[in-house]
Image (tube, rainbow, N blue to C red):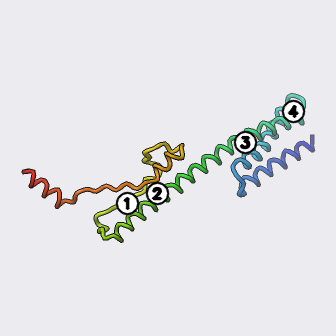
Amino acid sequence: MKDLKISAMTLLSAAILFSGCGASNTTKGTVIGVGAGAAVGAGVGKVAGNTALGAVIGAAVGGATGAIIGKRMDKQKEELEKVDYNQTLSERRAKSVYDYLIDQGVNSRRMIYEGKGIHQPIADNSTVAGRAQNRRVEIIISANEKMVNEAKREAGE
């Protein structure tokens, strides 16, 4: 029984240690789940009459649960990083076209640029072809105030 308490304390200490290092959330979740599961399982096992078996079962269940939760957290983090990367890439693509047009003599006061990233797709981002279509630059030409006034005058407004 004393050895089991020491083992549970060791697992909990490892869980605390791993939670602060650069390990992935999957690893952290597993370690924390094993430690917490073993401690809870030992308590339940003690009431049921078999502390060691309770600790082993608790560690297995806690570790698996922690790994599943940690893996989901890692996936979410990767997706968020991908969104940030793609947004930055979109902004750089738009700025590149903007700079090219300035080099061709277009006045910078007549243009703006913005990267839409994944926020305004025209095709399905889950396919290679769709992602290729979404890597685009749209150029919108609009009349300045002088041209609008001239058009109104010609139309008799």
Q: Give the class, few, some or many, for how many residues have Cα within 10 Å of label 4's Cα (few <14, many ≥20).
A: some
- Above-or-below relation of 4 to 16: above
Q: Residue at x 90, y 29 (%)?
A: 49
Q: Which disc, if any, is residue 113?
A: 1
Tell me which amino acid carries mark 2. Ser
Instruction: Say whether disc 4 or disc 3 marks the residue closer to the N-terminus.
Output: 4
Q: Which quadrant does the N terminus fall into? A: top right
Instruction: Say whether disc 2 or disc 1 marks the residue closer to the N-terminus.
Output: 2
Residue 132 image offset from top left, x and y in percent: 49, 50
Instruction: Measure the C-alpha gap from mark 2 to mark 1.
Output: 10 Å
Name the mark nearer the viewer: 2 or 3: 2
**Number of labelled discs?**
4
Disc 3, SS: helix
Question: Is 23 situated left or right of 2 in this image?
Answer: left
Q: Give the class, few, some or many, for how many residues have Cα within 10 Å of label 3's Cα (few <14, many ≥20).
A: many
User: Disc 2 marks which residue?
Assistant: 90
Instruction: Say whether disc 1 or disc 3 marks the residue closer to the N-terminus.
Output: 3
Residue 145 image offset from top left, x and y in percent: 19, 59
Q: Which disc, if any, is residue 66?
A: 3
Q: Quadrant of residue 70?
A: top right
Instruction: Say whether disc 4 or disc 1 marks the residue closer to the N-terminus.
Output: 4
Instruction: Measure the C-alpha gap from mark 4 to mark 2.
Output: 59 Å
Disc 1, SS: loop
Q: Which disc, if any, is residue 101?
A: none
Instruction: Measure the C-alpha gap from mark 1 to mark 3.
Output: 45 Å
Question: Is 117 situated left or right of 68 in this image?
Answer: left
User: Disc 4 marks which residue?
Assistant: 46
